């Protein structure tokens, strides 16, 4: 049995931090805070009152998922105060531009000695996770929470980061702690809605996001989130109505335009989805978002098994990503082609890996490592399908080395999915299941786990997983590849008893 990964051990410390009731003491900053903050709130150090206002406006925009507007405000903040470390850190955390991320991460590190101990911890958390030093980053995050356990925004921000790592229980504890401080903290209801949805509790998800709408009726994101809960519930037409309402409220809210494409995609109306994605690509506020949406449009061909058209769309997306200097997305396009194509698999994977290695100094190491891990997973999957178990185990060993070095939660899950896939191909069902169950948010892994349950005679779990797969409406490449089987006329995956 492998030891518990270091990253997970550190994450488990958060459970203890959630019981803390007293904030730690901090030393005074070398410069005066812009405003006197309550004792339970993390200070923001700046020499400029105007910079403080821009920073706060940016944080409100971030809470409302207006990330492009948040970036604009934080850029203004650092112009007014070039030593505002946390603003640099949040630009680093939010931007999709690799060059901008690198430059502002460096500025955050260079200026962190000028700010309070709490802000230094925040910078360390963000910088370390971007540099693939997760144990160090999460330790700083934990220390920051211990210092300001009653800071509602801090609890929300950490919970949101944990949610994106699929750490739902920990995210819920911190989100509820934020709501305990302020029962009308709107963004926390949004987060609770998503947490409920990931557990399949759509009634409570709709209730939470409905509260979000009531608290912020004139903001587009509450309507966008409510629409997503409707879509996840299978209420597609209502979802489309609410996405359009968000766009009517603010035609520049590009997220809702993208979500129209997502909704039509999971409805099986792929041509209509491409029309909506084309509008989202046009409206995208940055090259990183545009590169992402180009590949979402390409995914629609996978659902229809139009692989020649998918090849063309992904190749064009890779070329555009290269032109926009979006290296991760360029490599990803080749990795995805290796996932569904029967020919040129090794070539596409080698191209993807070679691109990443050639740009290893131009992209965040955390992002690079996660994409490399996905490439090694595809190597394991394709080797297993060919019964080349030596190659399959070699790929799994590469992933295990990354995990033991303190990789992200995402890489840990990728390792488990790959290991379970190889073990299933070797008919080692109990061992396969123990790994596959760790990668619970990946439809391809869930499909393999379903086969493992069937082969091992675990009928109750197999039936529950079939139901979960059938109503999985979170668009991704993995979902797009599983989708045709789930919704085929013979119902190959779902109707099996």
Image (cartoon, helix red, strand yellow):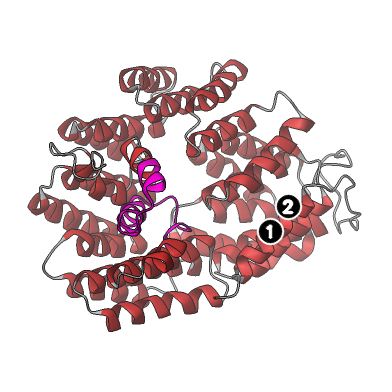
Return the residue nearer the eye: 235 or 243. Answer: 235
Up-down relation of residue 225 to residue 315 (above or below) = above
Q: Which residues are magenta?
A: 436-464
Q: Residues within 10 Å of mark 1 (few under 14, many from 20)?
A: few
> What residue sits 35% from the left and 26% below the top?
234
Secondary structure character of the magenta stretch overall: helix
Seen in the picture, residue 117 relative to 154 is either above or below; the reply is: below
- Residue 274 visible, this angle: yes
Q: Quadrant of residue 250?
A: top left
Task: Where is residue 435? Give x, y as percent.
Answer: 45, 64
Query: Can you give x and y, in whole percent of width and height, for residue 458 in the image?
Result: 38, 52
* Helix, strand or loop for disc 2: helix
Question: How many circles with numbers are drawn on the protein?
Answer: 2
List x then y, in percent, for residue 397.
41, 80
Q: Which residue is mark 1?
A: 12
Say which residue appears at 32% left-offset and 23% top-offset. 236
Residue 428 against residue 440 in the figure, above or below: below
The answer to whether 283 appears left or right of 142 in the picture is: left
Q: Which residue is under mark 2? A: 15
Magenta stretch: includes residue 457:
yes
Q: Quadrant of residue 183?
A: top right
Asked if residue 370 shows in the view, the reply is no
């Amino acid at each position: 049995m492998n030891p518990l990964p270091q990253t997970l051990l550190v994450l488990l410390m958060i459970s203890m931090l959630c019981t803390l009731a007293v904030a730690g003491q901090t030393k005074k900053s070398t410069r005066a805070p812009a405003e006197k903050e309550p004792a339970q709130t993390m200070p923001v150090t700046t020499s400029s009152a105007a910079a403080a206002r821009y920073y706060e406006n940016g944080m409100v925009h971030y809470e409302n998922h207006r990330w492009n507007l948040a970036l604009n405000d934080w850029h203004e903040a650092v112009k007014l105060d070039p030593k505002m470390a946390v603003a640099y850190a949040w630009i680093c955390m939010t931007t999709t531009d690799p060059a901008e991320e690198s430059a502002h991460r460096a500025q955050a590190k260079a200026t962190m000695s000028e700010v309070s101990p709490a802000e230094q911890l925040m910078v360390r958390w963000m910088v370390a996770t971007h540099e693939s030093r997760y144990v160090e980053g999460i330790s700083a995050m934990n220390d920051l929470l211990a210092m300001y356990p009653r800071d509602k925004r801090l609890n929300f921000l950490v919970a949101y980061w944990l949610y994106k790592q699929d750490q739902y229980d920990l995210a819920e504890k911190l989100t509820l702690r934020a709501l305990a401080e302020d029962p009308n903290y709107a963004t926390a209801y949004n987060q609770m809605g998503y947490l409920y949805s990931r557990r399949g509790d759509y009634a409570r998800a709709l209730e939470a996001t409905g509260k979000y709408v009531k608290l912020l009726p004139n903001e587009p994101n509450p309507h966008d989130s409510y629409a997503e809960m409707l879509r996840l519930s299978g209420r597609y037409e209502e979802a489309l109505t609410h996405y359009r309402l968000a766009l009517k409220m603010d035609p520049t809210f590009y997220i809702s335009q993208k979500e129209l494409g997502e909704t039509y995609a999971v409805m099986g109306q792929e041509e209509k989805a491409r029309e909506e994605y084309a509008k989202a690509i046009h409206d995208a506020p940055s090259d990183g978002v545009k590169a992402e949406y180009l590949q979402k449009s390409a995914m629609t061909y996978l659902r229809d098994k139009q692989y020649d058209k998918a090849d063309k769309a992904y190749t064009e997306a890779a070329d555009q990503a290269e032109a926009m200097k979006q290296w991760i997305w360029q490599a990803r396009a080749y990795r995805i082609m290796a996932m569904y194509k029967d020919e040129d698999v090794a070539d596409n994977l080698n191209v993807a890996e070679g691109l990443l290695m050639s740009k290893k100094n131009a992209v965040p190491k955390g992002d690079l490592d996660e994409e490399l891990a996905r490439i090694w997973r595809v190597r394991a999957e394709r080797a297993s399908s060919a019964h080349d178990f030596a190659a399959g185990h070699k790929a799994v060993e590469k992933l295990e080395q990354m995990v033991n070095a303190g990789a992200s939660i995402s890489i840990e899950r990728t390792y488990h999915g790959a290991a379970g896939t190889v073990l299933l191909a070797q008919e080692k069902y109990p061992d396969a299941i123990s790994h596959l169950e760790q990668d619970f948010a990946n439809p391809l892994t869930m499909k393999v786990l379903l086969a493992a349950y069937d082969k091992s005679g675990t009928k109750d779990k197999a039936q529950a997983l079939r139901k979960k797969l059938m109503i999985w409406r979170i668009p991704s490449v993995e979902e797009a590849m599983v989708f045709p089987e789930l919704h085929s006329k013979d119902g190959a995956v779902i109707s099996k008893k």
